[in-house]
Amino acid sequence: MTGKSKAISNVPIHLSIYSPHVVNLTLIDLPGLTKVAVEGQPESIVQDIENMVRTYVDKPNSIILAISPANQDIATSDAIKLAKEVDPTGERTFGVVTKLDLMDKGTNAIDVLEGRSYRLQHPWVGIVNRSQADINKNVDMLAARRKEQEYFQSSPDYGHLAHKMGAEYLAKLLSQHLEAVIKAKIPSIISMINKTVDEIEAELDRLGRPIGGDAGAQLYTILDMCRAFDRVFKEHLDGGRPGGDRIYGVFDHQLPAALKKLPFDKHLSLQNVRKVISEADGYQPHLIAPEQGYRRLIDSSLSYFRGPAEASVDAVHLVLKELVRRSIAATEELKRFPTLQSDIAAAANESLERFREDGRKTVIRLVDMEASYLTVEFFRKLPTEPDKGANNNTPANDRYQDNHLRRIGSNVSSYINMVCDTLRNTIPKAVVHCQVKEAKRNLLNRFYAHVGSKEKKQLSAMLDEDPALMEKRDSLVKKLELYKSARNEIDSVAWK
């Protein structure tokens, strides 16, 4: 990864060593801290190494081995300095002094090893490693350990500490300490593992478990996804989730506002009433009441209701389509099947189109029904006496005078207002019956029948999962197995 350069990489090399001569211990060998970049290294090498080291020693569960050469003043040790920063109490820091055999004659590291120069909670350990000459001569580790022990035992400075010196003692000391720390932390470790297992299993439930390969299992999964979507959609309509209230808004605000904007003032103006009455009379003016004129004015007025009626149908249709989109997005079980999401959305929208057409025909029929048969009782109750002060011997031609036409316009307006009040109540009923209720009952009925006739290959295509989700599930399954294995391992040895 670093090529032939002197750069470093933060990707670890994992090396497992098995031997009857070693203890159970996991050791992370970090690069030594440097102060300057040498040729072939980037200028950032000093900070890069420190950052890398910190990512390991910062962890509260790690044990820090602060290594310092004996021929260097301990006060200037970068390892001790960094260990003190991340572990100020010293609870997890062990001091190690190397190169004791390379110190100048007449000097020793007794003050350091006995804790007088710098005190740690744990004892300092001195070690003597193989020299470069020993390595070149292929001196094996067992021989090197014997030579190291002989050095301490024969040393006039360190003889009294020989039983507490050497790499073998250090390994046992660290192994015993690590075991003690692990035992002390077992309850919290098991608690953390149990919590993580629960979280992973919950996440797997959310992502969905693997599907069986046979057609029956696939069909069951598809129908189960459809039912989950249908539940969410109904919750939107019934108020369990937001969105359904917008349908009421169409009836309570949009429809009344549209009805109020209809141009009846212009249509029933004096000028237009005169025009319609005159055209309805033809060459022979009416004798008593201009019935044909009345009917033409009413019919033409009622035709204006078609617009708001159809607009209500379309508005509710748009709300229902939006609720379908929201429901698909909110159905957790569907997120792993993008193809099935598209199929359900297409089937639901196709049904909504049918329901819209039924709703449109029904509301138009309501308007047409009002025009087909007028409420006679309404006109029979209208006052029939002539205007006060009017000449009862008015010729037929004078029946087109303003007062008479105003009364006709007023009568038609009163009738239209009565019909408007009726439609304001019946249009919502028709829309809900034809669109909303049908969407709740039969949104995916045709889709169910269509899916039931598909072959296994077609069902598999519908359950084509998002590769990213499949990869995530596989990763979670492996992680779950690892945590459960760790839990079993801990349970088996925790109380031995």
Image (spheres, rainbow, N blue to C red):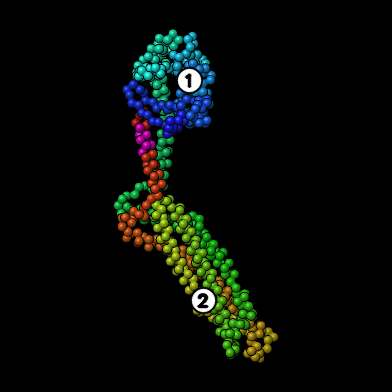
Which portion, as a residue range, is magenta?
480-489
Looking at the image, is 364 positioned above or below residue 63? below
Mark 1 lies on residue = 68
Residue 485 highlighted magenta (yes or no): yes
Q: Earlier in the sequence, mark 2 or mark 1?
A: 1
Q: Classify 10 Å Cα crowding around label 1: few (below 14), some (14-19), many (20 and above).
A: many
Residue 22 location in percent, x, y?
A: 35, 22
Whether residue 95 can be seen here: no
Amino acid, disc 2: Glu
Disc 2 to disc 1, C-alpha distance: 101 Å
Q: Is residue 173 above or below residue 317?
A: above
- The residue that appears at 53% across and 79% down in the rendered structure is 374
Could you tell me which quadrant the C terminus lies in?
A: top left
**Amino acid marked by disc 1:** Ser
In this image, 186 relative to 306: left or right?
left
Residue designated by label 2? 370
Q: Is residue 247 magenta?
A: no
Which mark is drawn over residue 34? none
- Residue 248 position (above or below residue 62): below
